[in-house]
Image (spheres, grey):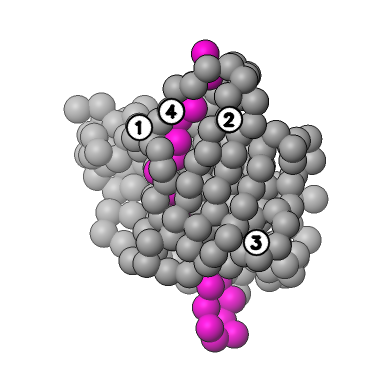
Amino acid sequence: GAVVSQHPSWVICKSGTSVKIECRSLDFQATTMFWYRQFPKQSLMLMATSNEGSKATYEQGVEKDKFLINHASLTLSTLTVTSAHPEDSSFYICSARQTYTTRARTDTQYFGPGTRLTVL
Amino acid sequence: AQKVTQAQTEISVVEKEDVTLDCVYETRDTTYYLFWYKQPPSGELVFLIRRNSFDEQNEISGRYSWNFQKSTSSFNFTITASQVVDSAVYFCALSEGTSGTYKYIFGTGTRLKVLA
């Protein structure tokens, strides 16, 4: 259980184009999903928190107009990199936090396999 | 301020050796959660364990064991009889219980190389 998928797994695009990355929780509902960016040999950097049915919360320094996040359902969040430039090339990872119907709190995030974006 | 420190940037061991990965955390919350994830070369983070701040019991799962000590704010991870397949980057993470954001604070990761 607790499987998260990402699509595409890799993408190459020209500078100035927009790229959409999908994150799906396959076997559970996720009220909250997270988008991270990881540069080579570095840790994960949280970009934004995506909440189903509401606006995403962006971390300081992340341009909300450049990285558009939509969390339209309890199993799907999308990240669109608009007008991509070579400096946006990176490994983008999403995670999903399982929603429980009980009052038990859980903070475990399950991660997708990541999307490698290369902007030429 | 919340912080997770993984002081070991890279560790190399020979197969079958035991290895311990250190994780030290800082938080003002009394309720918090600690995690370990494995990131193999494929890139996907694999969940290994979650510990809440009220449960200091150490845990063993096969060749993996975790030592949680609140007195030293540490949550160390030991791999016994390491194998080449254990080669990966391992991340320790902290989630504070009262923030309501469920965000993780990640350590910088420890790259483990297990040599045959």
Q: Are marks 4 and 2 on the same chain?
A: yes
Up-down relation of residue A98 to residue A104 (above or below): above
Q: Are marks 2 and 3 in contact (CB under 8 Å)?
A: no
N-terminal-most mark, 4 or 3: 4
Q: Is residue A111 magenta?
A: yes
Which residues are drawn in magenta? Answer: A97-120
Task: Determine the secondary structure under disc 3.
Answer: strand
The answer to whether residue B81 of the structure is visible from this angle is yes
Mark 4 belongs to chain: A
Residue designated by label 1: B41
Residue at 38% in and 61% down: A26
Q: Are marks 4 and 3 on the same chain?
A: yes
Classify residue A10 by image quadrant. Answer: top left
Q: Find the residue positioned furthest to the left.
A: B116
Query: What's the amino acid at mark 4?
Result: Val
Q: Are marks 2 and 1 on the same chain?
A: no
Residue at 80% in and 50% down: B1
Residue designated by label 3: A51
Mark 1 belongs to chain: B
Between B57 and B86, the one lying in front of the other is B86
Residue designated by label 2: A18
Q: CA distance from mark 4 to mark 3?
A: 25 Å
Number of numbered callouts drawn: 4
Judge the density around disc 4: few (<14), some (14-19), many (≥20) Cα neighbours within 10 Å. Answer: some
Between B70 and A6, the one lying in front of the other is A6
Task: Determine the secondary structure under disc 1.
Answer: loop
Query: What's the amino acid at mark 1?
Result: Pro
Judge the density around disc 1: few (<14), some (14-19), many (≥20) Cα neighbours within 10 Å. Answer: few
